Image: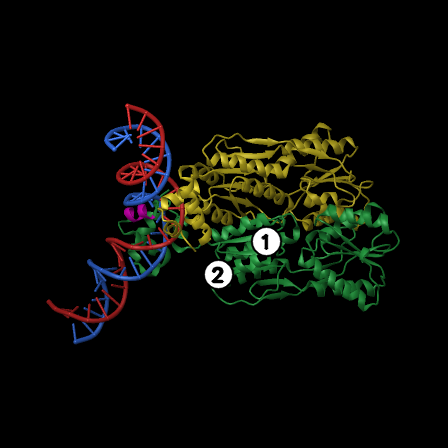
Chain colours: A green, B yellow, C blue, D red
DNA sequence: TATCAAAATGTAATCCATTACATATTTGAT
DNA sequence: ATCAAATATGTAATGGATTACATTTTGATA
């Protein structure tokens, strides 16, 4: 592979001039520029980003930390991140943490190693102090999951409010017994959605018992399916609606209802959260809360890049929307 | 951020020694090593990968080119790639090409720029000559989609055979009129699966007409749905089974059948291809061809890394499996 | 204790591009 | 034709690590 030296020699100029053609073409005579460009062409020269990065001490790379790439919710955010990052001349490093601290810290080391200029994390804050400490040294934006420490920036939606509204919608439809299928409460969204769920119940004077919440360990179709299977066998006839805090869980649960011949929505209403694409393909289609995932990813990148440039940024809370379909 | 110089000074040794502690600890006295490690600890030193990469002229980064990240099929492959790459100490750069040549060539430039040590592409070969040319200079492995040029390595399944077997399965079930919902024939898999489909029909002496194939432009749920909508309105009663070359399309088509109240499998059988997770959640569950996606990604990385090391590699064709479920 | 090979450590070149500063060339006014 | 100012180009330092080669230290042996 040819280097800038080779180009300089071939064009009969100095490396500085070649570099200028690349970076500040206006500082070079038309004639010289032509010569240099011809030489580049002939040698099929492409500047080594390794060299450039070292000199500029930047990598033009953004770290993206997600619990699991296979969850369509994160995926859509990543899409937003990818495209926006590209527009700004950044590439992304997608890393799955499986919500494990060790993994996460391996990846955060990429910041220390200067392999990434900043990070967007969608992980629940496992070790807050460490994150705060890290955020002091490096540009970091939290996306979806967050911690309200003032030194940590984030973009998210109001999960509590959304869950409150959705629960209220179910209550207004006449449901008195609603089960919440929640995911691990290490996730802030799980805690917030539970809070909103409770608030609505309280407002309707519905007494609440702990066993109306089913906690799953994983956010997978199977976990949702398993949850519903268990609920149906233990509490048949005792509830008429289910609120799953994630579409993936709702879809699994809905599948189980289909399998067992429970009619949706006549015998049982079910709602999800996120509005992933699949929710439009289920039978019946799933009522859910739409999160602007693509936009969230896109804005997260804008925020992060501002941070990298040293500009001040404000936290962002995006709007959500109830999508009422045939599952309720 | 401290550099190796800082560590050397603090520990009272030369940079070479510090580097040795990092790379060949055995070449350093226990005592010195301790001193150096203490200094690193105190300074919270992490070696700059930028500097290291430049010197070693490698980036320990793999380029992964996929048409669309939102297709669960590719996603699962990417999962396999990510985890295996990590095991080998590589990170991955996931890039969506949207099957556009311009995009693809921007990304391939990352190889020229030495930002990636090699690439795995899942894109249909748009410009074969260019790819061959590129593969001469850089380690490249084709995954799923491929071109049989001897200078290009690939890992895939036998799509033609799988489609042949699946079609034969439908024919044996007594179906005489089967519609193929195909995707764009720029994809090799689309051409191969069509070929297998034809071979089976021929074997059963079923005459074939071009309008038994519905070609979609996109591989999305909506495209599948649209396909079925169009088929139902134009050819109602004229076919009893549908073979979609991708689960995503099949799921969309199935949704339309559900919507229109066509009973599956009694009135219409439908099969897909890939075995993405969601096929287990549809109503009824989808019969499909299982591709070992995770494994495909994993092996693709092994192949690529061998190539990077300059070792010889053989092309790989993985086994597939018919998954018969309730949609047939 | 002197000697010498082996082991440990250090010096300095190297990877490739960028850029401050120095030098050369051009421009345009007189 | 002359000269200062403006413009174009070149020289060399720089970023942070690795490593070939040179030098020093160690420790076994005579």
Chain letter, disc 1 residue: A
* Residue B83 at x, y percent in the picture: 58, 42
Query: Magenta includes A5?
Result: yes
* Visible residue check, residue B181: yes
**Which segment is the magenta one?**
A4-10
Viewer-proximal residue, B135 or B240? B135
Which residue in the protein does label 1 denote?
A: A78
Which residue in the protein does label 2 denote?
A: A308
Element class at badge 2: helix
Decide if residue A65 is on the left or right side of residue A193.
Answer: left
Q: Quadrant of the C terminus of chain B?
A: top right
Query: Mark 2 or mark 1: which comes first in sequence?
Result: 1
Neighbour tally class for label 1: few under 14, some 14-19, many 20 plus, Cα within 10 Å: many
* Visible residue check, residue A114: no
Residue at screen point 74% across, 56% down = A272
Query: Magenta includes B23?
Result: no
- Location of residue A168 (image quadrant): bottom right
* Residue B23 at x, y percent in the picture: 43, 41
Please, is residue B36 above or below residue A163 in the view? above
Distance from the alpha carbon under mark 2 to that under mark 1: 19 Å
Please, is residue B273 above or below residue A39 in the view? above
Decide if residue A268 is on the left or right side of residue B28.
Answer: right
Chain letter, disc 2 residue: A
């Amino acid at each position: 592979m040819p280097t800038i030296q080779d180009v300089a020699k071939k064009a009969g100029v100095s490396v500085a001039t070649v570099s200028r053609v690349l970076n500040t073409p206006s500082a070079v005579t038309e004639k010289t520029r032509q010569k240099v460009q011809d030489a580049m062409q002939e040698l099929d020269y492409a500047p080594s980003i390794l060299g450039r990065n070292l000199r500029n001490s930047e990598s033009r790379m953004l770290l993206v930390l997600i619990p699991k790439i296979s969850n369509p919710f994160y995926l859509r955010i990543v899409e937003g991140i990818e495209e926006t990052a590209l527009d700004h001349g950044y590439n992304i490093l997608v890393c799955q943490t499986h919500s494990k601290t060790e993994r996460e810290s391996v990846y955060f080391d990429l910041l220390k190693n200067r392999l990434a200029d900043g990070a967007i994390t969608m992980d629940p804050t496992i070790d807050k102090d460490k994150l705060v400490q890290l955020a002091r040294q490096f540009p970091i934006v939290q996306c979806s999951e967050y911690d309200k420490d003032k030194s940590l920036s984030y973009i998210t939606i109001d999960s509590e409010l959304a869950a409150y509204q959705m629960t209220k919608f179910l209550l207004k439809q006449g449901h008195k017994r609603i089960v919440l299928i929640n995911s691990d409460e290490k996730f802030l969204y799980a805690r917030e959605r539970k809070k909103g769920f409770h608030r609505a119940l309280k407002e309707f004077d519905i007494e609440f018992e702990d066993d109306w919440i089913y906690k799953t360990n994983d956010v997978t179709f199977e976990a949702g399916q398993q949850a519903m299977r268990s609920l149906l066998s233990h509490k048949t006839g005792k509830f008429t609606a289910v609120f799953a805090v994630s579409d993936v869980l709702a879809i699994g649960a809905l599948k189980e209802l289909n399998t067992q011949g429970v009619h949706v929505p006549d015998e049982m209403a079910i709602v999800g959260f996120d509005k992933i694409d699949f929710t439009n393909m289920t039978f019946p289609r799933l009522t859910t809360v739409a999160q602007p995932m693509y936009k969230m990813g896109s804005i997260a990148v804008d925020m992060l890049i501002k941070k990298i440039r040293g500009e001040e940024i404000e936290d962002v809370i995006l709007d959500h929307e109830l999508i009422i379909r045939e599952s309720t």
